Amino acid sequence: MSTTSTIAKGLDGIVAAETEMSYIDGINGILEYVGIRIGDLSSNSTFEETVFLLWNRRLPNASELSAFVNELRAAYALPEGMVERIGQLPKDALPMHVLRTLVSELALSDPNPNDNNTKAAQAKAVRILGCAPALVACFDRHRRGLEFVAPDPQRSFASNFLYMLNGSDPTETMVRAFDICMILHADHGLNNSTFAARVIISTLSDVYSALTGAIGSLRGPLHGGANEGVMHMLNEIPSVDDVESYIMGKIQRKEKIMGFGHRIYKAKDPRATDLQSLARKLAEDTGNADLYEKSSRIEQIMERELAHRGIYPNVDFYSATTYFCIGLKLDLFTPMFALSRLGGWSGHIIEQLSDNRLFRPKAQYVGPHDVPYTPMDNR
Ligand code: CMC
């Protein structure tokens, strides 16, 4: 009655879409956005320019970049009533649940939320990317009992977020560090949340629904939630001297070490290399050298114990120390990943819409057949 077919559990190795946005060579630890090495972008680009690159598949000239930056800045403001709405949210809510809820809610203030033509989808993407930092910052200030700080359209994406969060001028070093984090997290092939976004938009649903689903996917500890897991682990280890016994205990109990391992990379994630340098410098500058030393010691032990199985640091490992040194609270780490990845997700949504076919894989049914219906009284 049933035919069996090979099941690729976790869709491991399955190519399910074409993309012109990012390329990953997992064996050699290479990541490119539209052909440009990630290290070149993190050294030379800005988040705004990187998003333009991902959406247009080329770098902008000066006037194109300026126009895009202005468009994004014009979208910083929250829709009417949103600040009051955030003020009603429970203060103990998790920021990722808040971000997911509010991105979904943005559809309610869009007169044409279902318009999926390329121009409209891109305008929605700008709108959501532009105001998402204010959603996170406003909620964080609400839970701390502080007044909302209105976005400042004179500021870059990175500067504006830190300004709204803290209510003061961020230093140039912090702005650049945060901008680099945004560049590094912006896109990464058909990762779980990007796939979720593409699956949802493939029904010709809408941009808000696809991004809401992607945020829900990202928060899992096997995906973007791992950066918070790394920080929990660093907090649990009392000192550098305790790292060896802590990590060996986890390995012996066959527990996963957060921030290590990747479906695609069997070498060190190039984003982890960039973030490591950033984390080292920020940790020294902010008096958190012990945090970096603990991380570095963990990496050495993992190299010794698990590198032969292709388990190396991924993007989330050193981003934890980096975000901590920027002054972000632990439960804002994954929302930071989401703010950046909104750029990548939106690009994939538009890419999917431009050559859409409904995602609809099959499941291998492994249950019984021809089971008689048992009346309620006989169960
Ligand atoms: N620590 C210890 N062992 C590990 C780890 C780890 N971090 N990652 C994988 N393994 C082992 C795993 O236990 C399994 O061993 P065995 O074959 O003996 O059962 C083997 O390696 C294969 O692991 P898997 O989970 O089946 O591999 P996958 O390709 O499905 O998973 C992963 C990739 C990212 C889910 C996994 O490496 C993991 O859970 N890592 C920890 C969480 C994490 O850091 N996630 C962030 C990923 S990168 C950023 C992002 O995508 O958001």
Image (cartoon, rainbow, N blue to C red):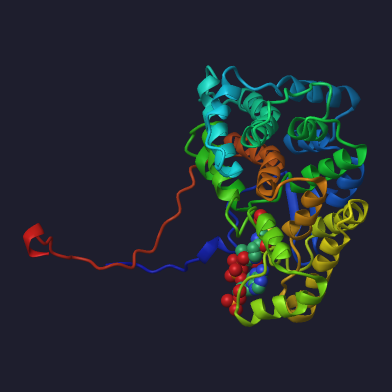
Q: State whether residue 32 appears in this view.
A: yes
Q: 305 or 136: which is nearer to us?
A: 136
- Rendered-image quarter of ligand 1: bottom right
Q: Position of residue 22 (x, y in %)?
A: 74, 48
User: Where is 325 relative to 314, above or below?
Assistant: above
Q: Quadrant of residue 350?
A: top right
Q: Quadrant of residue 252?
A: bottom right
At a point 63% along the width and 71% down the height, the residue shown is 256
Q: Position of residue 376 (x, y in %)?
A: 10, 58
The single residue placed furthest to the front in the displayed view is: 145
Q: Position of residue 300 (x, y in %)?
A: 82, 74
At a point 76% along the width and 36% down the height, the residue shown is 51
Q: Quadrant of residue 241?
A: bottom right
At a point 42% along the width and 56% down the height, the residue shown is 362
At a point 67% along the width and 69% down the height, the residue shown is 257
Q: State whether residue 263 appears in this view.
A: no
Q: 373 or 90: which is nearer to us?
A: 90
Q: 372 or 43: which is nearer to us?
A: 43
Give the left or right position of residue 74, taking residue 349 as reference.
right
User: Where is 186 relative to 115, above or below?
Assistant: below
User: Where is 197 relative to 251, above or below?
Assistant: above
Can you say which quadrant of the picture contains the N terminus? bottom left
Can you say which quadrant of the picture contains the C terminus? bottom left
Give the left or right position of residue 330, taking residue 39 as reference.
left
The single residue placed furthest to the left in the displayed view is: 377
Q: Position of residue 105 (x, y in %)?
A: 52, 29
